[in-house]
Each structure stands twice: as structure tokens, then as C-alpha cells.
Amino acid sequence: MSEIRFFSGESVPLEMHKVRMVQKVNLLPVEKRLNCIIDAGFNTFLLKNRDVFLDMLTDSGVNAMSTDQYAAMMQADDSYAGSETFYRLEKALQDLFGMKYFLPAHQGRACENIISKTLVKPKSTALMNYHFTTTKAHILLMGGYVEEIVGDGGLVVQSSEPFKGDIDISKLNEAIKRIGTDKISFVRIEAGTNLIGGQPVSVHNIREVSQICRKSGIKLIFDASLLADNLYFIKMRESEYKNTEIVEIIREIASLFDIIYFSGRKLGAARGGGILTSDDELFIKMREFVPLYEGFLTYGGMSVREMEAMAVGLRETTDIDVISQTPVFVEALSNMLHSKGIPVVLPPGGLGCHLDAKQFCSHIPQTQYPAGALAAALYIAGGIRGMERGTISEQRNEDGSDHPAEMELVRLALPKRVFTLSQIKYTTDRIEWLYKNRSIIGGLKFIEEPKVLRFFFGRLSPANNWHKELTQQFRNDFGDSL
Ligand code: F0G
């Protein structure tokens, strides 16, 4: 993809696949979109997919699968124990990561549950480049703490730093000294650091962190859910690896960790998850939880058809044309928006384009959830469903006060090989209109607030009548257009 230059000099994210199966989408009139977002409590998670035109909520479980993945599903071996499918998936994982053991789980957070139950003791601290919502929730549930040690540059919305997900080595050393190795449950590195804008981690940084952890006897864990995008960035931005085979990069990374886990809804482009380790003791401890929470050891709560598709999807992760598709589309969307003065996270990461709601809606205080308001406004403006990744996605502090997020982002996820360039252009157009009318957007307040992971099904209401005003403005500007 990146090898093909256009005569015009234009940078175009060219698709290296053809589309053979399609799904119809609908765009409702703006007045209907207004009603839908009211019914959904201004929470894009609660919208019905039939009311969404472009679903950019997530890349989780919604990537396009290849013909080879679908073909593989046909050979699934349904059996409670000892299924041939399990051994095929295990082999694919061992070939890629070079680790001894594979424990299947129904998705990424299930792996987090098992790992937290195995390693998190009350009042212990898990150090990590940055938390992910479900990761943190599982650690807190076990009575542990989370401390983030990403470099300061990781939280700067716009910079030219190539690896904003890297751990700050001096912060790591300081935390080990202050907390003590016996009070550290583990160090966790998240590939394609989700909540700071899908930002990658360098092999160089992983190597340094691994050396420190090995010297101190601290377990090092890799969340490889977003590894595919991260591998692309290593190839493009870490000069040492420019000519290294992707599988060799994966092998080298894997050799630096004690445990690797992943959401198979992302890595492998199917639906499921798994944990890998070469450590006999850890394997035996974690194995106990698999039949208890997931299912027998040879399916772990997954459908065998998904496991077959995942095995093929994992192998396809070594194809640069496959792993580049999301990052180059994210780059195209981010650059189109940036060129119009719209604040987005730069450099563009993987996973999706991230709007900076703190700047976009600088008139909305953080206590009124600017990223949540912007996500709701974008649905009204274009039927586009993004995801709030700001204060609503945080859990409240123990004293009940809101925990203001370091970044207020609206994520427009681009699942692999799903959207076309014209849909990306439409998205840019509606965001540009919204940016011109941003002063209309107002804040939100909770009317129903779950205690854990409140962003999933919490309901909110607008602070004033801004949603109706925005709808009217759309009609004024677009006439009878949808
Ligand atoms: N780790 C990372 C980095 C993730 O992005 C996710 C999920 C998980 C763990 C949990 O995996 O969903 O299979 O249980 N991220 C999804 C998202 C939900 O939309 O970003 P899961």
C-alpha cells in the first residue's frame, strides 16, 4: 500500500483488497437522529445499529474478515474437549509468538480477569504505560492500584513523537524504588495504547523495560490487542526494523515478556481472546481459572468457528497490506481534519482518528463531559457513531468525585477494511460543519449512572436545549439533505 505512488503526488490510502460481501447502511433524517440520541440517553453505546450510518464506535469484533478466514470456519471441529480447532489455533499462536502455552478465553477482558486473579494482591500496584478501562476495573476489583508511567509526551495531543505509548524509564525506576518490588503486581505494556489515541510502543522501549523487570524480578505483561497497528508503526518509524520480517519482530517482542494476552476481537480479526506464556508456574496458576470462568481448556468460551477464523487472521497479521490498512486510513482522516484546523491527536495512531474535545468544545467544562457531548453532537450531525474516551470513561474516585480524564477524546474507530474513502470524506465534511457550529454544542449531566464501567450504559441529558438548536442549524444549512 505505502509502496504505490500516485503520478499526481497525492497521498491516497489505496485499498489492497476487493470487497465481495457488503452490508446495507441507512442514514436517517436529522430530526430522527435527534430522537434516537435522546432515546439513547446521549450515550452512543445505547444507539441501535440500524439507526447508525457509519459505525465508528470500535474496531472490536467488527473488522472485515478475509475469504480465507470464512473458508477456515467451515473446517471447525466442534467438540467440548480436545478439538482439532484448538490445536490449529495453538499452533498459529506458537508459530507467531514462540511461547509454550496458550490459554483460550472468550475475549480480552476475560484474560484480564484471569491475570488479575492470579497476580493482583490487595494494595499492590500495577505499573503500566496507560490503563485500558476493563484492565483497570479488574485490577481495582482485586483491591489493587494502577499507576501510569507513560512518557509526558504521550499526553500531548499534537506532537511529532513517533512512539507516544513508550514507558518513561526514569518514572519506572522511580516507581520501583518508591513502591518496592514486593508491592508491584506486574508491569504492563499495552500495544497501540488505546486511550491516548492508539499510540504505538517501540521495540527499543520494550527491551529497556524488560531488562529492568527481569533484573528486579517483576513480571512483565503485554496487552497485544492492538499489536497489528503497532507492528505497522514499528516497520515505518523504528529504523532498525525497516527491513525485518514482521514475524521476526513479533518473536523478538514476545521473548521480552512473561505473559502476553489479547482481545481476539481485535488481533486476529475474529471474536475471542487468549493468554500466552512460557512460564510453567504461571501457566498452572492461570489454567485453574479457565474452566471456572471461560469453558474447557480447548475452547475457553469461544465458538470453534471463530477460533478457526482467528488462526487465519493471526497469520494474516504478518502481511503488511493487512496491517497497514487501518493506520493509513486513520492518517488520511486525521490529516484531512487537521488541514481544516480541526483539533485531532497527532501523529495519527492506529485504531481510529481521535478528536480532541478539550479544544473542539473548549467552552464546555470537563465536569459537563465535552467528549461525551461531542460524540452525541456528531451523531446528530452525520449519523456517525464515535466513542467517548474522556471523563465519562473514567471511574469516580473513592470519595465519589469525578475523576477528570487527562485527555478528552472522541474516537472514530476505523475497523479494518470496512469503510471507503468517500465515507471518510463524508465524515470529514460533517465534522467540519460541526466545528463551524461548535459554540452551539452544550454539556451533559448523568441521569442514570452505573458504578462500574459507567460509560457502557449510563444515561445523560443535555445541560440546555443545544441538541435541538444544533438540529435546526443543520436543517438551515443543509436544506433537505439527509
Ligand atoms: N485491551 C485493549 C488495549 C483493548 O482495546 C480492549 C478492548 C481490551 C483489552 C478488552 O478486550 O473487548 O475483547 O474484552 N477494547 C475495545 C475498544 C472494547 O473498543 O477499544 P475485549
Image: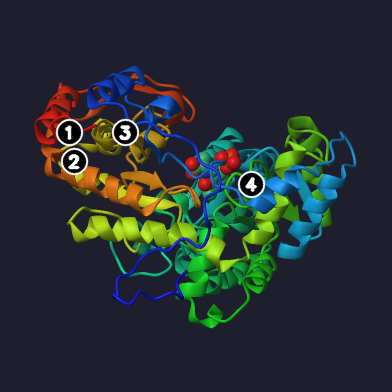
State if disc 3 and disc 1 touch (CB < 8 Å).
no
Kindly report the distance in space between the C-alpha atoms of the residues bearing marks 2 and 3.
Answer: 12 Å
* Label ID, residue 389: none
Kindly report the distance in space between the C-alpha atoms of the residues bearing marks 4 and 1.
Answer: 37 Å
Q: Quadrant of residue 476?
A: top left
Q: Amino acid at mark 3?
A: Gly
Q: Earlier in the sequence, mark 4 or mark 1?
A: 4
Q: Which residue is mark 4?
A: 264
What's the residue at 13%, 31% (across, down)? 479
Q: Which of labels 1 and 3 is toward the front?
A: 3
Where the C terminus falls, by quadrant? top left
Q: Earlier in the sequence, mark 2 or mark 3?
A: 3
Question: Above or below — where is 141 with respect to 337?
Answer: above
* Label ID, residue 441: 1
Q: Which of labels 2 and 1 is toward the front?
A: 2
Q: Amino acid at mark 2?
A: Leu
* Label ID, residue 434: 2
State if disc 1 and disc 4 touch (CB < 8 Å).
no
* Label ID, residue 383: 3
Q: Quadrant of residue 28?
A: top left
